[in-house]
Amino acid sequence: MQVTETLNTGLKRQLKVTVPAKDLEARLVERLSAAKDKVRINGFRPGKVPLQHLRKVYGKSFMAEVVNEILSDSTRSILSDRGEKAAMQPEVSMTEDEKEAEKVLAGAADFEFSLDYEVLPPIEDKDLTKVSITRLVYDVPAEEVEEQVERVADSARSWEPKKGKAAKGDKVTFDYLGKIDGVPFEGGAAEDADLVLGSNQFIPGFEDQLVGVKEGDETTIAVTFPEEYAATHLAGKEATFDIKVKGVAKAGDLEINDDVAKQLGLESADKLREIVRGQIESQYGAVTRQKAKRQLLDALDEAYKFEAPSKLVEAEFNNIWAQVNADLAQAGRTFEDEETTELEARTEYQRLAERRVRLGLVLADIGEKASVQVSDDEIQRALFEQIRRVPQSQQQRVYEFYRSNPSALASIRAPLFEEKVVDHLLGVISVEDKKVSKEELLADDDEKAEAKEARKPARKAASKAKADDADKAGKDEAGGEKKKAAPKKKAAKDEAGE
């Protein structure tokens, strides 16, 4: 086999590979000889088929197998011999001349093909101990824990029927039917809905119009859906809701004691407080980590400057661009609505794709050199967590898909590996903890970051498996409630862990 380099520019390589006809012949004879004792041909005893007759019958198909083996095996061996790692699977080009191809299969011509690929760039070792970040830390006060405990305990509060008009703090049970232009709309109806007035669970203006109703009342209220409403077909629309009040209840005294804790499935009020504190600290800790990770990635982005493989960047850009356009289509918006143009957006996302690829390569290199490993058990647990999110009827099918699809399973491993590398780096670099207020920790600094990274539609384009995941730090992860914009009742969550 003769390998000739025909292109070596930057990361791009092109090789011309020639396999002499005599080598093809030797492989073919070897394969025919191995098959001689196995094939059954009429007129010949087993093992007595002449090689030439065997070649006449099976020569072309066996030679095709030889060619495919060469293409499969030689690519790996050639790159290994050259000490190179391809960024993506090399592209193979062969002759399109049918007569030439027939000669190769007949063993009458050399087999020639070319390999086009990009190599992974060399990544320089850096003294990462010189990298420093400031980690924002919020100490949760007892008052905040107690407030959350009260909200949790509120789910076990007793309610007593109330005669008379509903006031703020009372619970109203009612049926409702929503209409737009007099026509009921999907998702706009419910029976025996419970709503605590003042809880802000429904769209603005809805609850205020229920203040003063009493059992047996029937009324119609008018509201306007918010412009930013999640269901775009309702956003900004005026609607009416026919209301039938089933009952009004007054809240009993809110008590936090062992009996209340037991109603929530816990042994004591102290255990309730312990669990609530742990959950709050975990939520704030997630924000702390994401912001620390973002600083770390920004520092790595500054420290490592090299050419990223164009095919990897192209693939990453295509993923981002497809998601961005899907998000815009779903929201019924355009680039102009986002105060940009398609050309400007493409430029921003191209730069974002380059950054992600570079950081992904850097993290992979650091993780490899630090012998960071993701165990099979960790992948299995993450896979089960992924499967748990789909309907039970589909779980076995999803499981089989991941287990039989290495690239899909790699998508489970990638974020686990990345987080382990981040953990490793946080133990290597200089990290200074800075105690801040809740407002400082939750301050939305995404705006500036996204102005650099891309416009708002890029939020959903961030992939969990990529190194830029820290840019998706959520504003509401540490207990800030998101107001429901729909007349549907907010799903009740047992914040004590149920």
Image (tube, rainbow, N blue to C red):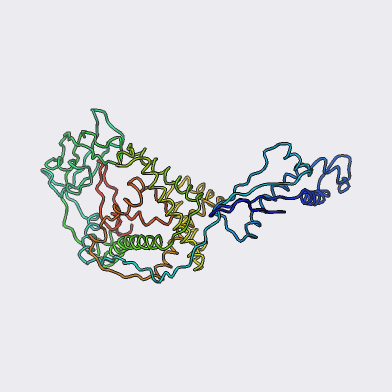
In the rendered structure, the answer to whether residue 123 lies left or right of residue 265 reads: right
Nearer the observer, 168 or 85: 85
Nearer the observer, 272 or 363: 363
The quadrant of the picture occupied by the N terminus is bottom right
In the rendered structure, the answer to whether residue 399 lies left or right of residue 484 reads: right
The quadrant of the picture occupied by the C terminus is bottom left
Is 175 above or below relative to 418?
A: above
Residue 237: x, y in percent?
Answer: 24, 34
Residue appearing at x 46%, y 61% in the figure: 362
Residue 40 falls in which quadrant of the image? top right
Residue 140: x, y in percent?
Answer: 25, 65
Is 271 above or below relative to 195?
A: below
Nearer the observer, 491 or 142: 142
Residue 119 falls in which quadrant of the image? bottom right
Residue extending farthest top: 182
Nearer the observer, 451 or 3: 3
- Asked whether residue 114 is in view, the answer is yes
Residue 213: x, y in percent?
Answer: 13, 40
In the rendered structure, the answer to whether residue 253 lies left or right of residue 449 reads: left
Residue appearing at x 66%, y 43% in the figure: 94
The number of callouts visible is 0
Residue 183: x, y in percent?
Answer: 26, 28
- Asked whether residue 267 is in view, the answer is no
Residue appearing at x 15%, y 42% in the figure: 208
